[in-house]
Image: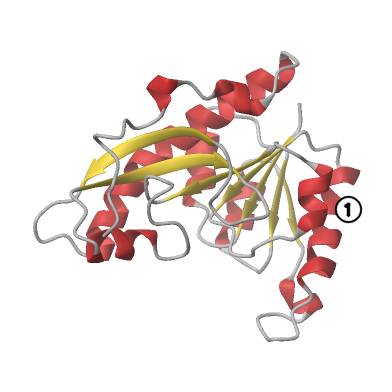
Amino acid sequence: MTLAVLVSGSGTILEAILEAGIAVDLVVSDRPCRGLEVARAAGAEAVLVDRADHGGFSDAFDRTGYTSALTELLVERGVDLVAMAGFGTVLDQPIHDAFPGRILNTHPALLPAFPGWHGVADALSAGAEVTGCTVHIATLEMDAGPILAQASVPVLSGDTVDTLHERIKSVERTLYPDTIAAAVAAIAAGESVESIATPEKIATPEKKETTP
């Protein structure tokens, strides 16, 4: 079983995965970042597949070309499961063709409510009383893949985006590693990753956020 983790920043989610005792074989980043240092310190292979080589953050960014380069690396390393951990590049079709149903992502809201880059701010703006964290299978459509697990987090009076996001992250650091471990076990048993989703792992409608 070969697990790859994709990072872009400080690597705190990666640290939580490693601290949970999950073996990480490969860590890939789309830009120079601390996450690669965390990987090396843990003895995992750390590779930079730099966006700058494919147009960077300009309008000239070649998303398909970048995705193909990243996917080629993952395939070469014999990766079985991919976990995005604060990865900042939206990937194109090639990676989903290579790893169908085997790419995990975590989102700071109770999907399907508040998808996209600003899930925490959107929950606050909508006056949600409860938000949370969702682990789901990544698909070509952002934040729209099958939900594997969720955990609720109350929105407190006086919350800011920063304070609320930090409480969501504290839940995420347990929920995500637990879900990754379950996905690894499912693949090892010859089962699909989606099979680990059970009703008790998904927030009930009464607890879910509501959009305006």
Horizontally, residue 167 falls left or right of residue 192, namely left
Horizontally, residue 13 falls left or right of residue 30, namely left
Q: Quadrant of residue 35?
A: bottom right
Identify the residue shown where x is 52% and y is 53%. Answer: 11
The N terminus: image quadrant: top right
Identify the residue shown where x is 76% and y is 81%. Answer: 55
In percent of width and height, residue 21 lies at 55, 27
In percent of width and height, residue 61 lies at 74, 79
Identify the residue shown where x is 66% and y is 36%. Answer: 24
Residue extending farthest left:
157
Q: Report which residue position mark 1 lands on.
A: 72
The answer to whether residue 33 is above or below residue 188 is below
Residue extending farthest front:
212
Pick the front one: 145 or 56: 145
The answer to whether residue 160 is above or below residue 45 is below
Q: Is residue 20 visible?
A: no
Residue extending farthest top:
189
The C terminus: image quadrant: bottom left
**Label 1 is placed on what type of residue?**
Glu
Identify the residue shown where x is 53% and y is 37%. Answer: 17
Q: Quadrant of residue 115?
A: bottom left
In percent of width and height, residue 30 lies at 68, 65
Q: Is residue 99 visible?
A: yes
The answer to whether residue 197 is above or below residue 137 is above
Horizontally, residue 159 falls left or right of residue 7, namely left
